[in-house]
Amino acid sequence: MTRSIRTLLPLAAILGACALTVQAQTPLPEPTALVDQQHCMFCHTPGAPFLAPSFHQIAEHYRKLPDANVMLEQKLRIGGRAHWGNTSMRLPEERGGPLSPEDAHTLVIWVMSH
């Protein structure tokens, strides 16, 4: 039995890694009310650049950067200069009003799931 467990452990690790990869590539359900309130789709789309990078491009660009979520949440809350391209993030007043830290976190987690 010990030999069977030693044989199965590497397989379990591989399957677990595959499950995490699939999970990271499957976007979370869209927080539609927040996306609509903040007019996200005026500049972004899920898969292709429009006036600004797609959600997928944003996720790919920031996925491996430490503290990227914190920086992106702050950018959502206060707006800011463009990180690439020429389109800056609109100020909250121009997008649908102030965004709470919790709502900013929800949007960033959703975008990073792309």
Image (cartoon, grey):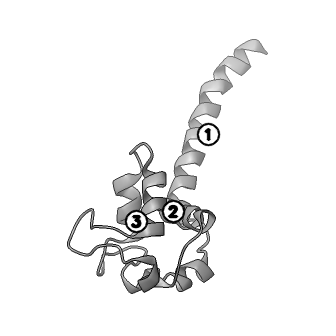
* 64 relative to 105, above or below: above
Determine whether the residue tagged by mark 2 lies in a helix, strand or loop. helix
Disc 2 marks a residue whose amino acid type is: Val
**Figure quadrant of residue 23:** bottom right
Q: Which mark is residue 80?
A: none
Residue 82: x %, y % from top left: 27, 67
Question: Residue shown at 24%/64% (left/top)?
Answer: 84
- Which of the two labelled residues, at mark 1 and mark 2, occupies the earlier sequence position? 1
Location of mark 2 (residue): 108
Q: Which mark is residue 56?
A: 3
**Figure quadrant of residue 26:** bottom right
Question: Looking at this view, is 45 or 16 the one in front?
Answer: 45
CB-based contact (under 8 Å), mark 1 and mark 3: no
In the drawing, does residue 94 fall left or right of residue 8? left
Disc 3 marks a residue whose amino acid type is: His
| Quarter occupied by the N terminus | top right
Q: Nearer the viewer, mark 1 or mark 2?
A: 2
Location of mark 1 (residue): 16
**Figure quadrant of residue 92:** bottom left
In the drawing, does residue 69 fall left or right of residue 42? right
Q: Nearer the viewer, mark 1 or mark 3?
A: 3
State the separation of the CA atoms marked 1 and 3: 23 Å
Determine whether the residue tagged by mark 3 lies in a helix, strand or loop. helix
State the separation of the CA atoms marked 1 and 2: 25 Å
Residue 71: x %, y % from top left: 43, 54
Question: Residue shown at 46%/60% (left/top)?
Answer: 74
